[in-house]
Image (cartoon, rainbow, N blue to C red):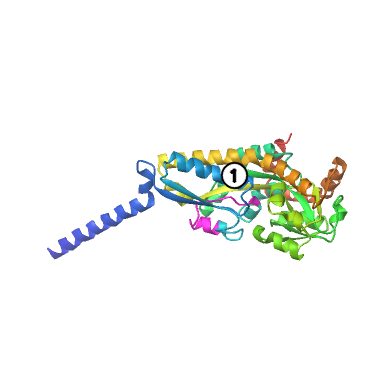
Amino acid sequence: MKKWYLALLTLVLVFSLAACSSGESGGSGDADGVQELTIKISHVVAENTPKHQGALSMKEYIEKESDGKIKVQVYPNSQLFGDKDEYQNLVANNVQFIIPDMSKLVGNDPGFNIPAMPFLFKDDEAANAFWDGEKGQEIFKRLEKDGVLGLSMWPNGAKHITNEKKAIKTPDDLKGLKIRTQGGQLLEAIYGDLGAGSTSIPFGELYTALQQGTVDGQENTYSNIESKKFDEVQKYMTIMGHTRVDYALLTNTKFWDGLNDETRKIIEKGVEEGTKVARDSAMDLNDDALKTLKDRGQVEIHELSESEIDAFKKKLEPVYKEWAEKIGADIIKDAESKSE
């Protein structure tokens, strides 16, 4: 009798634990109605940038369509997490969306070097088309091993060089300069071939590094240069467009898989709205930022001619070929086709 009772008790306990486990792993994802959630979106740049405008659009759409059941908190300017720790905190689900510069992901997969390939894309539309296509989505899927889901590419645009020392018009003009980059071996190789040193400094610390002369210059988009007022601590800017700043909108797979269908549809649509706003605003904000930089008149601006650009392309051919092999010939071919 006692053995029978113990066996029954054990069986009941097993079924109870199984039921609890089932509820924790996926029960919330099957429930009806919009789930009550608080979602955090973290990024490292200023409010008057395409990234922030896209994040605000996500917030507005999701909160409105969920009738306030989903609260979205947006943290710009590294207020929540910075370059160095945002990915780890996404993996830990301490934040539900981050929008890092793709250069921060090159250690996770070499495909994220695409924006750093010199003179690869002719404009934002070509870059958008690549990341929306088969090969771009293939690169995003490689993050799933970390428990991270790549949702979309948000452009910031082509990068241009500022520095404190001299006007940059030829490859030789970069010799001896120390330039801050977003990091990664490809960018190191580019500046190494140009005779310059490169170092990675968190974006939120860059103004001070330029002001104190820790580095001579940096490369960035017009909107990032203007919004952070780098022209206050730099004398020269070269309009170059040699590499790009493109962002990856990422989420945590555990968070995503825990959403039921109704909730996920609202958030997916919010992502679509945010992507549209980020992409539409990128060109306008960069155009406005360049005008503001010219109007402020604090930095001497030189725009490379076609022949000057060709000189840089020729100088960087060895780097391009080497990294095309590392990234994958099929991926590079697909990317090049978007600018044809």
User: Quick one: quadrant of the C terminus?
Assistant: top right
Looking at the image, residue 264 sits to the left or right of residue 46; the answer is left
**Residue located 59% across and 47% down the image:** 52
Residue that lies at the very extreme toward the left in this rendered image: 1
Between residue 328 and residue 152, name the one nearer to us.
Answer: 152
Q: Which residue is mark 1?
A: 53
**Residue located 82% across and 60% down the image:** 177
Q: Please, is residue 35 above or below residue 12 in the view?
A: above
User: Quick one: quadrant of the N terminus?
Assistant: bottom left
Q: Which residues are magenta?
A: 87-102
* Residue type for callout 1: Gln
Position of residue 226 measured from the top left corner of the image (x, y, whole percent) = 71, 50
Residue that lies at the very extreme toward the front in this rendered image: 296
Identify the image quadrant of residue 211. Answer: bottom right
Looking at the image, residue 192 sits to the left or right of residue 201; the answer is right
Between residue 306 and residue 222, name the one nearer to us.
Answer: 222
Between residue 77 and residue 118, name the one nearer to us.
Answer: 77
**Residue located 66% across and 57% down the image:** 203
Asked whether the viewer can see residue 297, the reply is: yes
Does residue 99 belong to the magenta stretch? yes
Label 1: how many residues lie within 10 Å, few (<14), some (14-19) or many (20+)? many
Q: Secondary structure at mark 1?
A: helix
Position of residue 39 measured from the top left corner of the image (x, y, whole percent) = 47, 50
Does residue 110 belong to the magenta stretch? no
**Residue located 59% across and 44% down the image:** 53
